[in-house]
Image (spheres, rainbow, N blue to C red):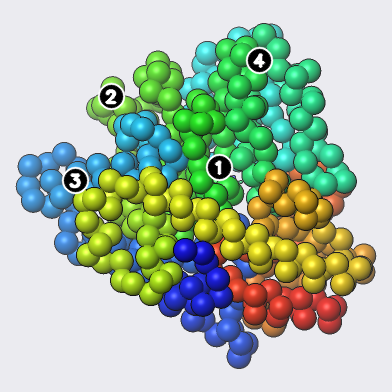
Amino acid sequence: MTLNDSSVQSLRQIFPALRKITNGQPAAFFDGPAGTQVPQMVIDAIGDYLINHNANHDGLFETSVQSDQMLATAHQAAADLVGASDPETVSFGSNMTTLTLALSRSISQTWNPGDEIVLSRLEHDANFTPWVLAARDRGVSVKMIDVDPTDCTLRLEQYREKITDRTRLVAVGCASNAVGTINPVESICEMAREVGAISFLDAVHYAPHASMDVQRWDCDFLVCSAYKFFGPHIGIMYGKRNQLESLQPYKLRTAPETIPGRWMTGTQNHECIAGTLAAIDYLASIAQLASGEQATEQTADQHQINNRRLRLESSMRMIRQYEQSLLIHLMEGLRRLPEIKVWGITDPASFDQRLPTLSITHPRHTPKAIAKQLAEDGIYVWHGNYYALPLTESIGVEPDGMVRIGLCHYNTLTEVDRLLKSLSRL
Ligand SMILES: Cc1ncc(COP(=O)(O)O)c(C=O)c1O
């Protein structure tokens, strides 16, 4: 089974937001990197939770017991999504930024003056500033991995130089939310492990496009956000059991000492956790849904749920293949518009090292003006730095930034053609 124009049309039927008409034209959502639209099953799961099961957890009455059952299933689903074998190693929280700020506070308690951490300039600020602030508080120095401005890839050779026996943490994104570059996180985590440093992966941008695999990558921590992978606004954090058990979270006395509860501060957003479970099951059911089948009974089937990880891997392969075909089409079209500069990897031979997220600039039109024209044509893109400030500063595009075109699996060739046509009128 592959995704193509017709199977994607079937999937699009499940997303009510994709029916939106804007300025008399169907809205083309190329703003996925800032947040994706959600399928009906996510909306239904949130509504169903609030109508039928809404309760705090750990009670003995029906709705509370049902809430706890849903939470246990959601932890398993999130573990399947990130590739973890143990559902207790996955926590939920407000969003990636809040989870990272909290974790950085705990991890940095183990640092001493003279220690070092290694960050990269390809990051969203949420995988940068929390660590810089923690380092400042603990008298720790920050080593930076630079970006090659010609193709916006990391200068990987610098890791060998900058990771030393003084390194306590290496934080890096799985992929850039601005230019789509995929980083070789498995080897970066290995280098961190060799010197006993903690590895922390930001998979927020990667999650909707390809399969995450914390066991293969062997990272200590990984964070992502459900609203980027067709779910509601909530964050997810994976950590190795030994790290989650030995680090001290900032938590209330009344919160459990066991994982995952010790990392999930306060009352959780149960309805969004229910929605996240539905989003993961949507992803796991892509092959079935794309062929026009209903997901209902079958997705709940125990056998299917047991296979969720395998089905997710196969869905993400289908998504990646389809998105690559859209990317190739878009890049070919952009090559016919020579005034437009595409930041990041543009050589098709290296497209396996990038996601279908690209940023463009124009010598005569500001990113804001371009985004405005596209908006008038019903095409949704983001302009500015999209919080990838370490990158935009290092490639010198501040203060205006760039225009980001973010493709995802519900986009179509027709939408890409509309985008190219609108850009050709600049
Ligand atoms: C790569 C990346 N990391 C981190 C974040 C922050 O995630 P959140 O909004 O869940 O805090 C974003 C959000 O855009 C992102 O794209």
Label 1 Cα neighbours within 10 Å, binned few <14 / some 14-19 / many ≥20? many
At horizontal 87% and vertical 61% (from top left) the residue drawn is 341
Dot 4 falls on a residue whose secondary structure is strand
- Earlier in the chain: of badge 1 and badge 2, it is 1
Mark 3: which amino acid? Answer: Gln
At horizontal 61% and vertical 22% (from top left) the residue drawn is 190
CB-based contact (under 8 Å), mark 4 and mark 1: no
Mark 1: which amino acid? Answer: Ala
Residue 149, image x, y percentages = 86, 44
Mark 4: which amino acid? Answer: Thr
According to the picture, the residue beneath numbered tag 3 turns out to be: 69
Residue 123, image x, y percentages = 68, 40
According to the picture, the residue beneath numbered tag 4 turns out to be: 167
According to the picture, the residue beneath numbered tag 1 turns out to be: 203
Dot 3 falls on a residue whose secondary structure is helix
At horizontal 76% and vertical 48% (from top left) the residue drawn is 350
Nearer-the-camera pick, 183 or 251: 183
- Earlier in the chain: of badge 4 and badge 2, it is 4
Q: CA distance from mark 4 to mark 1?
A: 22 Å
- Earlier in the chain: of badge 4 and badge 1, it is 4
Residue 373, image x, y percentages = 76, 78
Give residue 28's mark. Answer: none
- Earlier in the chain: of badge 3 and badge 2, it is 3
Q: CA distance from mark 3 to mark 2?
A: 18 Å
According to the picture, the residue beneath numbered tag 2 turns out to be: 258
CB-based contact (under 8 Å), mark 1 and mark 3: no
